[in-house]
Amino acid sequence: MSPARTQAEVEGRRQRARLWTTSGPGLVWIMLFLLIPSAGLLAIAFFSADDYGNPVLPLSTQPFQQVAGFSLLGWDAGNIAIFLRSLQQAGIATLAAIVIAYPLVFFILSRPPAVRPLLLLFVILPSWTNQVVRTYAWLELLGPNAPLSWLAHSLHLLPPELGLAPGSLAVTSGLAYNYLPYMIVPLYASAEKLDWALVEAGRDLYAAGIKLFWHTVFPQTLPGLLSGVIFVAIPAFGDYVVPALLGGDKAMMIGSLISAQFIETPDWPYGAALTLIMLAFTGLGLVAFRIFSRKLGGTGETAI
């Protein structure tokens, strides 16, 4: 064996060792807390439920029939309405995060370079607080005695005894607030690399306002925007803390429905089937979004 080949094999082993050292812990984490629990849910979803909601034999497709709305009392569209509401709330929250993130990102970029990391820290800082605490804060802000609710009362948008929370508006606000940093950070990373010469060229061609933004700024920030949409839309779709606290029975989402099957009114096979359907919808959404992002000029590697 030649010395050169021996050296190449040694270097190859070193690279494999470095790869396993850096990525190994992450792979173990994914195996333990994602793949194995998902495999367990897949098994539980095909069991029957006893009187206490625990999975028992024989195997059955009844949980998936329940997901589709079929039960002993006939068919009900409640689950479909909850799925559609979850998609709607996640979509509106994502749009709200985009509308808020763009001006905030460019405000930070307009500050001196030494100040920008501190402003970004202020954006991320609320995420260090438990999500339940942050959501309870919104419950206080939107409750019946809160100033925003008083304004709604004075405009005759709400009865005096009610508040903006619980309700759909409160859920949308809570989702947009909780996941806003996940939109701002990747968008800021793209905007920081903005080629301002292209913006100036657009101005020289008499473009201004929305037209200037759409043709010069938006294409350059598209990779960060696509990443932000993924980071906001997917967790917002499956969130259960915000809908449970700010929505109550008025705005139940898929995450709250799944949580109820394991905690409040146990039916483990039904809850597992709901979880698998949600994961399937999420996977299909990622594939569709990957195709859509490529058509817009982004890359799947950047967006997902």
Image: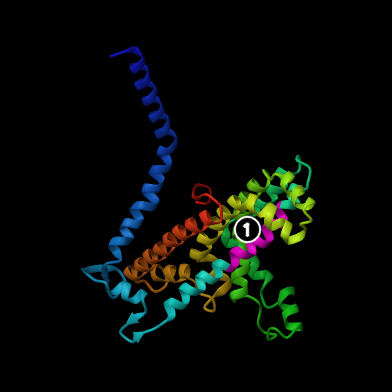
Tell me: residue 175, above or below residue 112.
below
- Nearest to the observer: residue 196 or residue 90: 196
Q: Residue at x 54, y 55 (%)?
A: 231
Q: For this view, does 140 lie left or right of residue 59?
A: right
* Magenta stretch: includes residue 98: yes
Q: Is residue 175 visible to us here?
A: no
Residue 278 coordinates in the image, percent (x, y): 42, 65
Q: Amino acid at mark 1?
A: Leu
- Nearest to the observer: residue 293 or residue 186: 293
Residue 114 coordinates in the image, percent (x, y): 76, 39
Q: Residue at x 33, y 61 (%)?
A: 41
Tell me: residue 39, above or below residue 302.
below
Determine the residue located farthest toward the front in the rendered image: 205
Determine the residue located farthest toward the top in the rendered image: 3
Q: For this view, does 197 lie left or right of residue 66?
A: right
The residues colored magenta run 92-105
Q: Could you say whether the residue bearing mark 1 is in a helix, strand or loop?
A: helix
- Nearest to the observer: residue 260 or residue 233: 233
Q: Quadrant of residue 147 in the image?
A: bottom right
- Nearest to the observer: residue 197 or residue 173: 197
Count of marks, rendered view: 1
Q: Quadrant of residue 192 in the image?
A: top right
* Magenta stretch: includes residue 71: no
Q: Residues within 10 Å of mark 1 (few under 14, many from 20)?
A: many
| On-image quarter of the N terminus | top left
Tell me: residue 163, above or below residue 213.
below
Residue 89 coordinates in the image, percent (x, y): 55, 70
Q: Which residue is labeled 1 in the image? A: 180
